[in-house]
Image: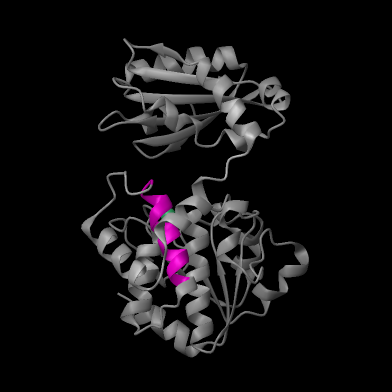
Amino acid sequence: MWTEIERVIDANQKFVVTSHVNPDGDSIGSALALCEFLRARGKEAVVMTSDEAPMVYRWLDPGGDMISPATEEDHHHITSADAVFIVDVNGWERLGSIGEIIRDAAAVKAVIDHHPYREEITPITVVDTSACSTAELIYDLITSLGGPLSRRAADGLYTGILTDTGSFRFANTSPVAHRITSSLLDAGVEPATVYDLVYNQNSEARTRLMGKVLSGISFAGNGQVSWLTVTRDMIADAGTRPEDTSGFVDAAMTIAGVEIGIIFVEAPDNKVRISLRSRGNKDVNKVASNLGGGGHKNASGVVFQGSIEEAVIAVTGEAVKAL
Ligand SMILES: [Mn+2]
């Protein structure tokens, strides 16, 4: 599986490792672990992303040398690189502003991902949708090539598996994921510390906003659809930002009997950002697709043009039909 990737590593000296827009635990953890591995092999390597990495993942980069967000002055890393590794994504448009620079660069490109195949960026592509995370694939790469697996790389890979499996709750939590996790603990990862650093970092303001949002929860379809609404005023009054609502939708899914949970977040220009979650066979990808959005069966999103009231009517109507 790794023959071609190994050839790319052996044949080149200067590397850029990049990933998708809106970086998450898996994209950042995987990219940093791969970068660490390349450096341990005597290569020059740097991690670069179009969008800024969330604060909760900054501890994975104690040297602060991850370039995130990348500006125009950083593009020379790409134009002068021998090879670019693209991880946790396999579509050009999901690479953001640096996608075009990478496309035009002379560097060899290689993709390592676990998302369903979208388009060919390069013939050197390893996509395995059976992997719980890209971190699982990077772990396999590092160990298949004989290491080394440093403590820092292990922290990145553990963070990737932790976040992409929803803290070992989602259906992708496989025996392989647990076996790799076991090796990562052997390499020194401290699970309680990582969990605190990633998840127990809410601000007081976000927690108060969450209280307000949760107290307004509504239901349809005999209690099988629940939804939360967040107006721009609520976000501003709490002294928070729209991204502080991330994760709120999961609270809607903790209620017994709820099959589909939805959050409506009012955005500028008469738009509403909507996230949907579902259990089992309830397909919220279909709900989102019918309204011009998309995603996976159990997690999807839509940007709705209209008021929050109009969005609630349209989306909950589709959600009830999907029960
Ligand atoms: Mn991932």
For the C terminus, the image quarter is: top left
| 131 vs 90, nearest the viewer | 131
Q: Quadrant of residue 267?
A: top right
For residue 49, above or below residue 258:
below
In the drawing, does residue 104 fall left or right of residue 286?
Answer: right
The percent position of residue 271, horizontal first and vertical second, equals 64, 25
Residue 121 in sight from this viewpoint: no
| 24 vs 93, nearest the viewer | 24
| 157 vs 309, nearest the viewer | 157
Measuring 52% from the left and 45% from the top, which residue is drawn there? 200
Residue 154 forms part of the magenta stretch? yes
Q: Quadrant of residue 77?
A: bottom right
Measuring 29% from the left and 59% from the top, which residue is drawn there? 177
| 61 vs 45, nearest the viewer | 61
* Magenta segment boundaries in residue numbering: 153-166
The percent position of residue 244, horizontal first and vertical second, equals 61, 36
Residue 128 in sight from this viewpoint: yes
